[in-house]
Image (cartoon, rainbow, N blue to C red):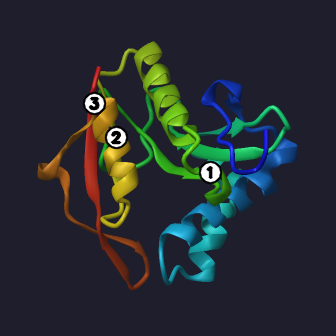
Amino acid sequence: MDAMTPAPASTLTIRPVHPHEHAEAGRVTAEAYRHSYDGLSENYLASLADVAGRLTQGEVWVAVEASGDIVGTVWIPRPGERLSDLALEGELDFRQLAVSPAARGRGVGEALTRHVIGIARARGTQRVVMNSGPEMLGAHALYLKLGFRRLTEREHPVEVEPGRVLDLRAFGYDL
């Protein structure tokens, strides 16, 4: 398979990040955000790369190709916990779904999202919720294709870092 041929999502393994992979998973996350958003501060990019810090508050899952390369990540809470105020009782929220720019279009984001839905179902939650930046139109299309719907009643400006406010979109998937 050459570099221009998309790898089918079935060749991916989605699993919890291993300790020796924290730096690489963090690099993939920060790279994905840098590619998608203009003007992110070095502090914010460093927070995205801080996998060990995220693990103190939840679980980080990685999408790994057969070659061993990490091509995507997603952050979810531990059972019974929440990562953000977006999630209400009985809901599972996820954050920082990131796909390496080189791996986009291969089904990595869809595979990670379906994995989160599967975890939510196994935990007995009623809904999966998440926020997405307004310019992430491709991601929005994916979420809607998978059955998410906009939760406009939960949308409001959010200060994602000091001095940077985004009008995030909210999405929910009822289980």
The disc label shown at residue 143, or none: 2
**Residue placed most toward the observer, 39 or 59:** 39
Q: Residues within 10 Å of mark 3 (few under 14, many from 20)?
A: few
Q: Position of residue 37 (x, y in %)?
A: 48, 73
The image quarter in which residue 132 lies: bottom left
Q: Quadrant of the N terminus?
A: top right
The disc label shown at residue 147, or none: 3
The disc label shown at residue 11, or none: none
Q: Position of residue 164 (x, y in %)?
A: 39, 81
Q: Residues within 10 Å of mark 2 (few under 14, many from 20)?
A: many
**Gap in angstroms between the C-alphas marked 1 and 2:** 23 Å
Residue 32 appears anywhere in the view? yes
- Find disc 1 in the rendering and name its residue: 54
Disc number lying in front (1 or 3)? 3
From the viewer's perspective, tell me whether residue 43 is left or right of residue 115. Answer: right
**Residue placed most toward the observer, 30 or 57:** 30
Residue in the picture at 83% in, 42% down: 19
Counting residues from the N terminus, which is met first, the one under dot 1 or under dot 3? 1
**Gap in angstroms between the C-alphas marked 1 and 3:** 27 Å
Q: Is residue 106 above or below residue 174?
A: below
Q: Dots 1 and 3: beta carbons under 8 Å?
A: no
From the viewer's perspective, tell me whether residue 86 is left or right of residue 139. Answer: left
Q: Amino acid at mark 3?
A: Gly
Q: Is residue 16 above or below residue 96?
A: above
Q: Is residue 42 above or below residue 94?
A: below
Q: Position of residue 115 (x, y in %)?
A: 52, 27
Q: Quadrant of the C terminus?
A: top left
Residue in the picture at 54% in, 35% down: 112
Residue in the picture at 39% in, 85% down: 163
Q: Residues within 10 Å of mark 1 (few under 14, many from 20)?
A: some
